[in-house]
Amino acid sequence: MSKPTLYYALFSPPARACLLTAKLIGLDLELKPVDFSKKEHLSEEFVKLTPQHQVPVFVDTDGEVYVDSHAIVCFMVGKYAGNDRLYPKDLKTRAHIDHRLHYENGVLFQVVKDIVARNTYGGESEFNERSITLCHNAYGDLENFLKNGKFVVGDELSVADVSIHTTLVTLALQVPVDEQKYPRVSAWVERVNQLLPENEELNLKGARALDTRIRSCMAENKDKGQ
């Protein structure tokens, strides 16, 4: 295998975090899109890679398979980046970045999962008040993180910014970020927008794709309820 392979779907915020991190460090990947509408994530080939049948999946040049976007972005930087700027070796800084990655996975991304469960698969035609409350709680946490610098950990862009950004720009299409209530978050979104390579083509396009899917299901749910 001459270069690493990434299995991805553009609608997936975690997959987009891996794509963007690879772009930031100049890592050339063999990209293999997984079409969920055709149930390719349930294919024998894909399930052999990950029984969880989720994207992203990273297969390194030695054939080793890595799953979970947070593990993947940290591994990519550690092995392939020319420096450790996105995931510093300094243990104090790394601990704070790890915390923000856990926040993305355990708090922010859980809001996406809640919305998808309710509005895509659960038959709900409006955004649930619980989903909205969870979202604002997550926005509030991020606003507090940003009190200490331009990015989620100090004044340097890190893998945590990339991971959180891909999820937040998706959520913001369902529950907009109020600039008056969350001024630091609003400024940070625009700041990171300017720093991510191919942000429009990869990140924002993928966010819109997931939002379109959610809203299409909501419209169908509403029609069924009439």
Image (cartoon, helix red, strand yellow):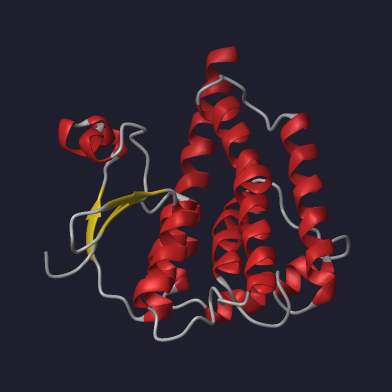
- At x 81% / y 62%, what residue is drawn? 143
Q: Position of residue 38 (x, y in %)?
A: 24, 34
Res. 163 in view: yes
Q: Quadrant of residue 15?
A: bottom left
Q: Nearer the viewer, residue 188 or 104?
A: 104
Q: Position of residue 57 (x, y in %)?
A: 32, 50
- Answer left or right for 39 relative to 85: left
Q: Nearer the viewer, residue 63 or 125?
A: 63
Q: Quadrant of residue 24?
A: bottom left
Res. 201 in view: no
Q: Which residue appears farthest toward the right when viewing the image? A: 181
Quadrant (top left/top right/bottom left/bottom right) for the C terminus: top right
- At x 23% / y 64%, what residue is drawn? 4
- At x 79% / y 47%, what residue is drawn? 136
Q: Position of residue 104 (x, y in %)?
A: 63, 52
- At x 43% / y 59%, what residue is drawn? 16
- Answer left or right for 199 relative to 184: left
How many numbered discs, if any?
0
Q: Position of residue 52 (x, y in %)?
A: 37, 33
Q: Which residue appears farthest toward the front when viewing the image? A: 91
Q: Is residue 226 above or below residue 40?
A: above
Q: Is residue 12 above or below residue 218?
A: below
Q: Is residue 122 above or below residue 93?
A: above
Q: Which residue appears farthest toward the bottom when viewing the image? A: 82
Quadrant (top left/top right/bottom left/bottom right) for the N terminus: bottom left
